[in-house]
C-alpha cells in the first residue's frame, strides 16, 4: 500500500515545496488550502506528473470540524496517513499595541490551533497503526521572538512547545513529532518587505542568502524518512545561521 502525507497550506510557498518533495519520495498526497484554488490545482497536477495520487481540500485550518472532514476523506481515499505536515500559517507585522484582539485570535487560531486540530484528528489513525510522523513548521521567531511580530512569534513558540510535549506523549505509540524552524524564506510572506529590507536580512544571514522553500522541503523529507527514525521532539533550525 502506498504511503500517504497530509500537508496543510500546501498550495504555495513552503507547503507546496514540501508536498512536491514528498510526492517525489513516493508519497500519495492530500493538501489543504484556504484561498488559491488555482495554486492548489497546480500542485496536485505536478504531484500526479511525479507519479503520486493527489487531492486538494479547501479547508480553513482554524476549523476543527473542517479538519475532521479532511482527515475522514483522506482515510476513505488512501486508507492510511503516514505523514502530517502542519504548515498553514499567516503573519502580520505591527506594533503590539496595534494588534487587535481579532488579529491576535486569528493568528493564534491559524498558526497554533490549526496544528492542534490536525494533530488531534490524525493521531488516532496513527496510534492504531503504531506508526506515523508529524512535522510542525514553526519559525526562528518562535525560538527568539521578533519585534513587531509578537502574535506570530507567540504562536510559533507555541508550536515548538506542542511539538516537544506531544513527542513525549506519543513516542511509545511509535509516532515521532518534530518541528522545523525556518529562517528568512523567499515566499509570499516577504511581500511586505522592501528590497532594501530583504537585502539587510540577507546580509544578516551568515550564509549570505535568503532561504528557499526547497530548503525547508529537504529538511521535511529527511525528518519524514527512516534516516531520522531516532529523532523526535526536536526543532531543526533551517535558517542559514541566522539563529545559532
Image (cartoon, grey):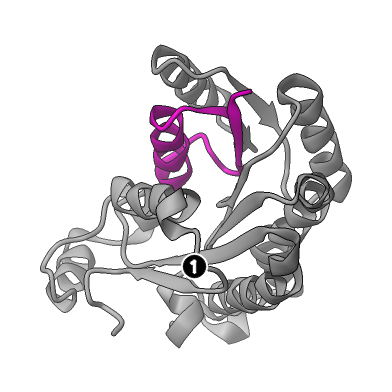
| Residue located 62% across and 77% down the image | 164
For the C terminus, the quadrant is bottom left
The quarter holding residue 46 reads: top left
In the rendered view, would you say 72 is above or below 55? below
Q: Give the magenta part as a residue range.
A: 1-30
Give left or right: position of 107 versus 9: right
Residue closer to the observer: 64 or 78: 78
Give left or right: position of 52 versus 4: left
Q: Is residue 22 magenta?
A: yes
| Residue located 54% across and 65% down the image | 178
Q: x, y (%) of residue 41?
A: 53, 19
At numbered mark 1, what does the secondary structure look like: helix, strand or loop? Answer: loop
Residue closer to the observer: 9 or 232: 232
| Residue located 49% across and 67% down the image | 231
In the rendered view, would you say 143 is above or below 191? below
The quarter holding residue 20 reads: top left
Which residue position holds label 1? 231
Q: Is residue 174 magenta?
A: no
Q: x, y (%) of residue 160?
A: 58, 75
In the rendered view, would you say 213 is above or below 138? above
In the rendered view, would you say 139 is above or below 132? below
Give left or right: position of 189 versus 102: left
| Residue located 61% across and 44% down the image | 8
Q: For the view shown, which residue lies furthest in the right direction?
A: 65
Can residue 148 be seen here? The reply is no
For the N terminus, the quadrant is top right
Q: x, y (%) of residue 68?
A: 85, 41
Q: x, y (%) of residue 181?
A: 43, 68
The quarter holding residue 100 reads: bottom right
Give left or right: position of 151 versus 139: right
Residue closer to the observer: 33 or 176: 176
Amino acid at each position: 500500500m502506498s504511503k500517504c502525507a497530509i500537508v496543510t497550506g500546501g498550495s504555495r510557498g513552503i507547503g507546496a515545496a514540501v508536498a512536491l518533495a514528498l510526492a517525489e519520495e513516493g508519497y500519495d498526497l492530500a493538501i489543504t488550502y484556504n484561498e488559491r484554488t488555482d495554486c492548489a490545482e497546480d500542485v496536485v497536477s505536478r504531484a500526479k506528473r511525479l507519479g503520486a495520487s493527489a487531492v486538494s481540500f479547501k479547508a480553513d485550518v482554524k476549523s476543527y470540524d473542517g479538519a475532521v472532514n479532511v482527515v475522514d476523506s483522506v482515510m476513505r481515499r488512501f486508507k492510511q496517513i503516514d505523514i502530517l505536515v502542519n504548515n498553514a500559517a499567516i503573519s502580520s507585522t505591527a506594533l503590539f499595541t496595534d494588534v487587535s484582539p481579532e488579529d491576535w485570535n486569528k493568528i493564534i487560531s491559524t498558526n497554533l490551533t490549526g496544528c492542534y486540530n490536525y494533530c488531534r484528528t490524525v493521531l488516532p489513525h496513527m496510534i492504531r497503526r503504531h506508526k506515523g510522523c508529524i512535522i510542525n513548521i514553526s519559525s526562528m521567531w518562535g525560538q527568539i521572538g521578533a519585534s513587531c511580530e509578537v502574535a506570530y512569534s507567540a504562536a510559533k513558540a507555541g508550536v515548538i512547545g506542542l511539538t516537544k510535549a506531544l513527542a513525549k506523549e506519543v513516542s511509545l505509540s511509535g509516532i515521532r513529532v518534530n518541528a522545523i524552524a525556518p529562517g528568512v524564506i523567499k515566499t509570499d510572506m516577504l511581500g511586505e518587505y522592501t528590497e532594501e529590507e530583504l537585502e539587510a536580512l540577507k546580509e544578516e544571514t551568515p550564509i549570505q542568502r535568503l532561504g528557499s522553500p526547497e530548503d525547508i522541503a529537504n529538511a521535511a523529507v529527511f525528518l519524514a524518512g527512516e534516516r531520522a527514525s531516532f529523532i523526535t521532539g526536536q526543532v531543526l533550525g533551517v535558517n542559514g545561521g541566522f539563529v545559532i
